[in-house]
Image (cartoon, rainbow, N blue to C red):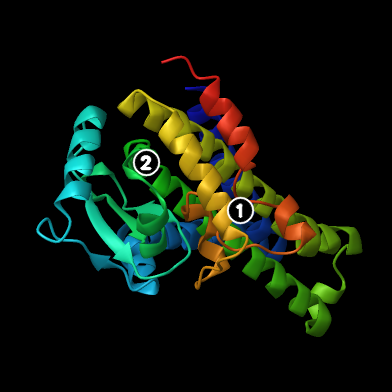
């Protein structure tokens, strides 16, 4: 409950930042335009984000005849979660990882990489699947998509403000402090809020998934293996989707690690081991 309230508050803050950016650029009419634009963005993200990300990673649906075992695990876990069985997809990449998508539990889908299927045992795979089904159950897939959409739009708006100040006569006369806040602080604040939402939802999915299957060791072991492998085997894809994966597969420099979409693996394992089932 606390995590949900926190997430709603952070999404509200992102919305406020976006409306404030619109007001800065165009006054009341700018704020109104920002509101309309945000509604259009969210509509698009709500209906099409799952299809886009699955296509982005060339995900192929796994049939029941192809892998009856993983279908059985998903049936068991989704039954415990009391949600419809999500579709399962395979991403042909050596980097071990998984992600969930879909606008609600009725349209849920989860994807695993070939690398994950190769290095994890059955108990570890079950823990990963439970984590991803928890994301679907908690509607984190939609929340994270909306947060990422807002953050991306704010970064674009900040660029508009910068070029407007550089080339536009009216924008040159703006308060320089306001311009600095708009160009630097607003997108940075939006990024920090988006990351806070992502980290909060990862902890919640770890706990919820463990409750579904009534054990923590499988997921804890899987997190450790995936984290170690991700240091050596790179994922091919767009870093903007890093928040979707169970472990961030796109390792960057020190700054990128500080601004991580995920809590540290060590913190997640400690949290799992402290969970009383």
For label 2, the SS is loop
Q: Nearer the viewer, residue 4 or 100?
A: 100
Q: Earlier in the sequence, mark 2 or mark 1?
A: 1
Q: Residues within 10 Å of mark 2 (few under 14, many from 20)?
A: some
Horizontal arrangement in the rendering, residue 99 relative to residue 2 (left or right): left
- Name the spot of residue 250 as percent of width and height, x first: 59, 63
Which percent across, then down, holds residue 206?
46, 34
Residue at the far left: name it. Answer: 65
For residue 139, the mark is 2
Q: Quadrant of the C terminus?
A: top left
> Where is residue 116 drawn, in percent x and y?
40, 56
Q: Disc 2 and disc 1: Cα gap in Å?
A: 25 Å
Q: Residue furthest top?
A: 276
Can residue 107 be spotted in the picture?
yes
- The structure residue drawn at horizontal position 63% and vertical position 61%, both measured from the top left corner, is 154
Camera-side residue: 54 or 170? 54
The residue at 18%/43% (across/down) is 85
Under tag 1, what secondary structure? helix
* 122, above or below 186, in the image: above
Question: How many marks do you count on the picture?
Answer: 2
**Label 1 near label 2: C-beta < 8 Å?**
no
* Residue hosting label 1: 19
């Amino acid at each position: 409950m606390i995590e949900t309230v926190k997430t709603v508050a952070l999404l509200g803050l992102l919305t406020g930042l976006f409306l404030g950016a619109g007001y800065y650029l165009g006054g009341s009419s700018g704020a109104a335009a920002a509101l309309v634009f945000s509604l259009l963005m969210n509509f698009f993200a709500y209906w099409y984000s799952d299809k886009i990300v699955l296509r982005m990673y060339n995900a192929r649906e796994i049939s029941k005849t192809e892998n009856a075992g993983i279908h059985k695990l998903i049936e068991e876990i989704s039954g415990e979660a009391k949600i419809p069985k999500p579709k399962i997809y395979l991403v042909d990449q050596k980097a071990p990882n998984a992600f969930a998508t879909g606008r609600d539990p009725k349209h849920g889908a989860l994807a695993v990489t070939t690398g994950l299927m190769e290095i994890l045992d059955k108990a570890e795979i079950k823990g990963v699947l439970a984590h991803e089904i928890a994301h679907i159950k908690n509607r984190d897939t939609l929340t994270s998509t909306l947060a990422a959409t807002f953050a991306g739009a704010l970064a674009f708006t900040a660029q508009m403000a910068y070029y407007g100040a550089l080339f536009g006569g009216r924008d040159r006369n703006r308060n320089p402090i306001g311009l600095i806040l708009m160009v630097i602080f607003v997108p940075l604040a939006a990024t920090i809020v988006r990351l806070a939402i992502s980290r909060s939802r990862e902890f919640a999915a770890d706990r919820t998934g463990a409750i579904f299957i009534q054990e923590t060791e499988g997921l804890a072991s899987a997190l450790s293996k995936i984290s170690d492998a991700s240091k050596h085997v790179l994922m091919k894809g767009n870093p903007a989707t890093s928040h979707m994966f169970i472990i961030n597969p796109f390792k960057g420099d020190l700054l990128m690690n500080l601004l991580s979409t995920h809590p540290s693996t060590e913190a997640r394992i400690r949290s799992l081991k402290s969970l009383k089932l």
